[in-house]
Every structure is written in structure tokens, then in C-alpha cells.
Image: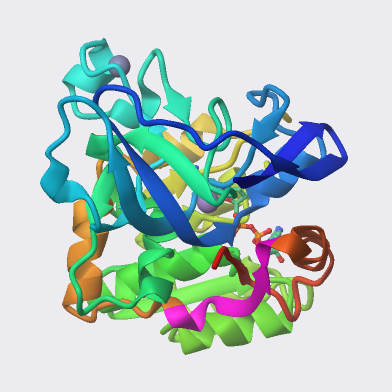
Amino acid sequence: MKSVVIEHPNQLTIAERPLPAPAAGEVRVKVSLAGICGSDSHIYRGHNPFARYPRVIGHEFFGLIDAVGEGVAPSRLGERVAVDPVISCGHCYPCAIGKPNVCTELVVLGVHRDGGFSEYAVVPADNAWVIPPAIPDEHAVMVEPFTIAANVTGQVNPREQDIALVYGAGPMGLTTVQALKGVYNVSQVIVADRIDERLQMAQRSGADWVINNSQQPVQAALEARGIKPTLIVDAACHPSILQEAITLASPAARIVIMGFSSEPSQIIQQGITGKELSIFSSRLNARKFPVVIDWLARGLIDPGKLVTHKFHYQQVTDAIELFEKDQRKCCKVLLTFN
Ligand code: NAI
Ligand code: MN
Ligand code: ZN
């Protein structure tokens, strides 16, 4: 089989590798579609501190089960599945309290272990979630990015009367906007980004109004309308945003951060305690695949609004370079494996 392998930083090969056999408790997935994410590019460029090389990248993928390991029901052969990349131990403290996404022995497919940019991938059977026939392949491959939004929103229970502010209109901001509008019916969702084309995508995903904060500071735009957001999600992840969010927030607001910056964020406690703000963080997803599959089945979200390009996996280098260079035209880029 062919696999997209990052041999070491900045060296990508399409390698011939032996077809893997699923171990006990695993299934083999014949991959048909995969999505490119910022973290794939970070591993390619050597910017992910968790990555070990060589590595088959890719953690957003969909395909058919074509082999099962010992202990897995043969009836699973032929299932259409989306694969949860989060593998956890099941018994540590975070696992015990329902946060396997921060398991003390966390393994993420495509990061710590070979992932889905490959003609075949072996994965734990429990991580392969069946996709109902009414959900098309191109929606199924987008389950993983929407699980990030399911995890973010799951931390804060959005309400209709919330005024939500989302920083960043990349894939993570857009999935969050779709969840806030489509699933939770939040009355007002405001999006801030520095790129007009990205803000147009946010509007197509349901944002009620948008702020280009390269032209006008978010604070001035909100003050002009007399608005104080009650729910703020930072999907842009610059270290300066947390303090800005604290300043802008309504009393009793919730803030969710999802960035991995190692730069310090300077924050003033008075701004948090004075308004009794709640600050949450969100990483990956805690078994949110069934949640998102249900959203898709009920037509509450539309992943098609994020997909801008599709390439055959043999063109993966071009695909990643386009993804890295052109945030105006490019949002979610899919790879096909058939
Ligand atoms: P992206 O790079 O496609 O989108 C980020 C967007 O934020 C861009 O449109 C950019 O113009 C905008 N932006 C940057 N600085 C800004 C600022 N100061 N104000 C307003 N907008 C700004 O990235 P993507 O894939 O949407 O991911 C966003 C962030 O989420 C990344 O930092 C990534 O590391 C993080 N992430 C976190 C995850 C988690 O589970 N915690 C999972 C996936 C991504
Ligand atoms: Mn991703
Ligand atoms: Zn664990």
C-alpha cells in the first residue's frame, strides 16, 4: 500500500509500505477520503513537539472496514466508518471522569501513531464509528473537525440568549459557528478575523455579523453596538486574545481557549474575578463522534461549507502547500484515495 510519510521535518514521501494486519481489537480501514489540518502541516514542518518521525500523518479520515482483528465481530466488515483519532487507556483519572482526550497515556492517530493519509490504516475497533447511509462520504470525513466544536460547546452549554463572539474563521472557528447556530440556536454569533474572505465564509456558516479586526479593534466594534459577549471562543489562538476576551466579556460570561502557544498570556485577575468569568479550555474531543454523527443525521450542520479544495493523495505536497499559503481561498482541503 501507499502511505504519505513524513520521514523527518520537511521531507514528505509517498512510500510503499506492507499492508498492515489488524491486531486483536483492531480493524483495518480502506481509506477513501481524508482532511488536511493545521497539525498535519505542523508535523510536516517540524513544529509539533509531540510528533515522532517517520510518521504517517492524517487524523481526519473516512473509509470502509476491510479486515477485522481477533475479537472484532466479522459483521463489521464493509462498514462505512469515520475514525476518532483519540486513543486512551480507559482507567487513568481523566479517562475515569470522561476526558479520554487528555488521557495520561494519550495516543493520537497521525501524531503519536501512524494515521490516515494512507491507502489503509489499522485502528482500534472502538474508534471506528459507523456512518448512517444517508450521510455522504464528504460529510463523514468532516466529523473529526466538528468534534472539536462539539467539545468546545459541550464545555459551556450555549443558550439561545447568549451573545457569542468567536475569534478566528478558520476551520475551527467555522465549525464552532455552525454548532452555535445550527445546534444551539444562539441568537447572536459574532466572528472576528483579519481576512475578509474568511469572514465571508463565517457568514455562510451562519455568523450574524463579522468584524475585520485588522481594520477595527473588536472592542471598538462591540462598543459601537453596546454589546458585551456572554460566550467567547478563541479559535484564533494568539496569546493576546485571552486578556482581550476578559476585557470584552459580560459579567458571568464563559470563555473557551483552544490554543497551544508556548508564549505567555498576560492576564489581569481582577478582570476575571470582578465579573466572575469562567475560563475553559478544550483539547481534541472526548468521545464526541456519536454527537456529531447525530448532528449530521439531523441536518443541523453543513460541512460542505468549509471544503474548498480536493486533491488526489499523489498531489499531497501541492495540497499542503496551497493549504499553508492561501488562507483567502483555502479552508478545508480533502485528499482522495481511490
Ligand atoms: P487557521 O489558521 O485556518 O485559522 C485561524 C484563523 O484565525 C485565520 O483565519 C486567521 O486569519 C485568524 N486570526 C489569527 N489571528 C487573529 C487575531 N488576532 N484576531 C482574529 N483572527 C485571527 O486555523 P484552524 O485550523 O482554524 O485552527 C485554529 C487554532 O485552533 C489553531 O491555533 C490550532 O492550533 C487550534 N486548534 C486547537 C484544537 C484543540 O483541540 N484545542 C484543535 C485544532 C486546532
Ligand atoms: Mn484536525
Ligand atoms: Zn487514560
Stretch in magenta: 304-313
Q: In the picture shown, does residue 33 fall above or below 240?
A: below
Q: Is residue 228 visible?
A: no
Residue in the picture at 81% in, 72% down: 326
Residue in the picture at 70% in, 75% down: 330
Task: Find residue 268 and report its horizontal and vertical position in percent.
Answer: 57, 34
Q: Nearer the viewer, residue 202 or 98?
A: 98
Residue 212 in the figure: left or right of residue 99: right
Task: Find residue 224 and report its horizontal and vertical position in percent.
Answer: 57, 82
Residue 175 in the figure: left or right of residue 237: left
Task: Find residue 194 and report its horizontal and vertical position in percent.
Answer: 73, 71
Main SS, magenta residues: strand
Q: Is 95 covered by the magenta stretch?
A: no
Residue in the picture at 39% in, 13% down: 104
Q: Nearer the viewer, residue 20 or 253?
A: 20
Q: In the picture shown, does residue 264 fall above or below 58?
A: above
Quarter of the image that includes the C terminus: bottom right
Figure disc tally: 0
Q: Nearer the viewer, residue 68 or 86?
A: 68
Q: Nearer the viewer, residue 257 or 11?
A: 11
Q: Is 306 covered by the magenta stretch?
A: yes
Q: How is the image coloured?
A: rainbow
Quarter of the image that includes the N terminus: top right
Residue in the picture at 24% in, 51% down: 129
